[in-house]
Image (spheres, rainbow, N blue to C red):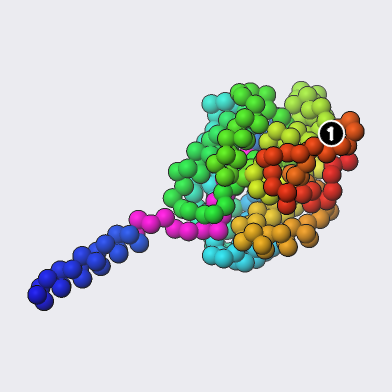
Amino acid sequence: MRALRTFVVAALMATTAWTSTHAAERVDLLLVLAADVSGSMDESKFELQRSGYAAAFSNPRVIEALRGGPRGRVAAAFIEWSGVLQQKVVIDWTVISNDETARQFGDRIMEAPCAFARNSASISAGIDFGMTQLDRAPYKAHRRVIDVSGDGDNNSGREPAAARDVAIAKGITINGLVILTEPPSHSYSSHTNPPGGLANYYRNNVIGGAGAFVVVAENFNSFGNAITKKLIAEIAQAEPQQQQQQQQEGSSRGGGERIWRRPAFDFESTSGTPKASPMFAPNQRWATGPPP
């Protein structure tokens, strides 16, 4: 009998050990950073984009927001995208939980070579690739986000709205970081300055899901501040919904960046009359009012 009890206890201990080893670690947020490296992103833009991401992960305000979450850690992956068949994981899933792990993640972004020779821009393929990374993530989180940064519209592959809608159906939020190009580049003017402006393009075709928003960097010099504000907002939104609503009330614009949230209504460009948009919940609003 004693031998039987010993065997049962040993079996239970082995089962518990196996379960704890193989159970996915819980984090506050799963975040895919999807960076544009298409043809309009010249060498100076590429370096500034990379350095902006690296600096943001070393920013004390980002670390403070990270530590304020229920679990005090997020998992992030950094991918780069260009044409339809050009997407690559630059940094695979990494848990960020303190100053050191955040700094290391930023350092790895700076050290990695550019994934591709610059080509066309397929935002939709970048979103699809981001969804694949979320599906294969070795961690679990209540909130899953794809963060698309770019300086132009989609000019290759299917429409980005189609990929966005698939992501929304999976419970994924897509946020946008728009990098404005002024004055318009002669070679890529229609790409970097589409009709209605790039910020409107992202709001209407790219972002979506719970609490989705667009951060606008007026120029590449303000990119670092823009990515810092965006990361803080994304990490804060990983907290319980009742806390999100309180925090979102304090969103503001300044320093060359603007944050626009996807509203519960789409505004007609001709009359300003709102029309219902069933994809977004009523508590999703402009952080700073409708676009001018």
* Residue at 30% from the left image edge and 63% from the top image edge: 17
| Nearest the eye: 27 or 284 | 284
Image: 71 above or below 220:
below
Residue 235 place in picture, x, y as percent: 63, 57
Q: Quadrant of residue 32?
A: top right
Q: Tell me if residue 182 can be seen.
A: no
What stretch of residues is rendered in magenta?
21-35
Disc 1: CA contacts within 10 A as few (<14), some (14-19) or many (>=20): few
Q: Quadrant location of residue 136?
A: top left
Where is 50 relative to 235, above or below? Answer: above
At 73% from the left and 63% from the top, the residue drawn is 246
Asked whether residue 191 appears in the rendered view, the answer is yes
Residue name at image x 79 percent, y 48 percent:
286
User: Which of the pair 276/194 is nearer the observer?
Assistant: 276
Q: Which residue is mark 1?
A: 268
Q: Residue at x 81, y 43 (%)?
A: 218
Point out residue 28 in the picture as x, y percentages from the top left corner: 55, 58
Q: Give yes or no for residue 113 being in the magenta stretch.
A: no
Q: Is residue 29 magenta?
A: yes
Q: Is residue 180 left or right of residue 46?
A: right
Q: Is residue 230 left or right of residue 286?
A: left
Mark 1 lies on a secondary structure that is loop
Screen quadrant of the C terminus? top right
Tell me which amino acid carries mark 1.
Glu
Name the residue nearer the viewer: 121 or 224. 121
Q: Does residue 9 appear left or right of residue 180 in this picture?
A: left
- Residue 166 in the image: state x and y as whole percent: 57, 35
Q: Work out which quarter of the rendered image holds the N terminus and state it.
A: bottom left
Q: Left or right of 192: which side holds 243?
A: left
Total marks shown come to 1
